[in-house]
Amino acid sequence: MDFIQRHRLLIIGLLCGLVLAVIVILVFLFVQSTAPHNTVVIDNPDTASNLSSDNIKEIAQKVYNSIDINNKADIYHSVIRDGSYTYKDSTVTFIVDIESIKASFKVVVTVDSNSILQGDIGILCVDKDQEIYSPALACTSTGFEDITQSSSNPDDSIYYDLGSHLPITTSDYSINYGRINSAGNYVSDGQLAVVVTLYTPDAKNKALAAISDLGYDINKLNFYYISDYSN
């Protein structure tokens, strides 16, 4: 093999190596750009049979936001606890366990007949008898839209007490509560109100009766109604 042939083969080899290096770099950058960041990854999402993959991602993000530790990691892997998943009257409840930080959170959401999330995502502390880690990461419920009992208005207490019974979902209505503005959007500085989604034209009275049956005076509550049916 003469010098020119060896030189040509060397150039071809260098070019092939350069092209391969560029491909590896591009693949790495693509994987990095599409990989999840600043979130919780639920490793067994199929357990949540009534929730879409987008629902799972949204819930996982809320769980991540609820982790209150210093130097929070970029990603936490978690699982839906065996036997914790329930679906009843459009309300989905399950427990997410994060082994690496010894944390558990109860998730409560409401979905419609098309498995689309309705209202807020509740991220709550598990009950004492549901704790599996010792010691466990300290937990503070973010509840629905991070509502906390920070208001000095004594009348607000009725909403927090009622909130222990919510959400309530039937085929006619769903009831939740939160801080909302005049446009009906959940905001941290909005007015506390009972949010009632109506699925049938005559659902309003049924929802009010359900609240009254729990022992609450509906005249002392603010209500925001969402009509989710065809006239």
Image: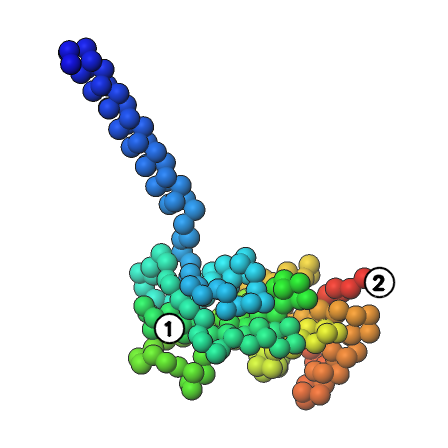
Q: Quadrant of residue 75?
A: bottom left
Residue at 40% over, 53% down: 37
Q: Nearer the viewer, residue 88 or 185?
A: 88
**Residue 73, how many percent across, how many down?**
33, 59
Q: In this picture, is 147 found above or below 160?
A: above
User: Where does the image place residue 168, in percent across and percent down from the top left?
Assistant: 65, 77
* Residue for point 82% across, 74% down: 202
Please tell me whether mark 2 sits on a helix, a strand or a loop.
loop
Q: CA distance from mark 2 to mark 1?
A: 46 Å
Which mark, by number, is residue 231?
2
**What residue occupies the far right of the structure in this picture?**
231
Q: Nearer the viewer, residue 3 or 210?
A: 3
**Residue 226 visible in the snapshot:** yes
- Mark 1 is on which residue type? Ala
At label 1, counting other C-alpha atoms closer than 10 Å, the crowd grade (few under 14, some 14-19, many 20 or more) is many
Q: Is residue 148 visible?
A: no
Q: Which mark is residue 103?
A: 1
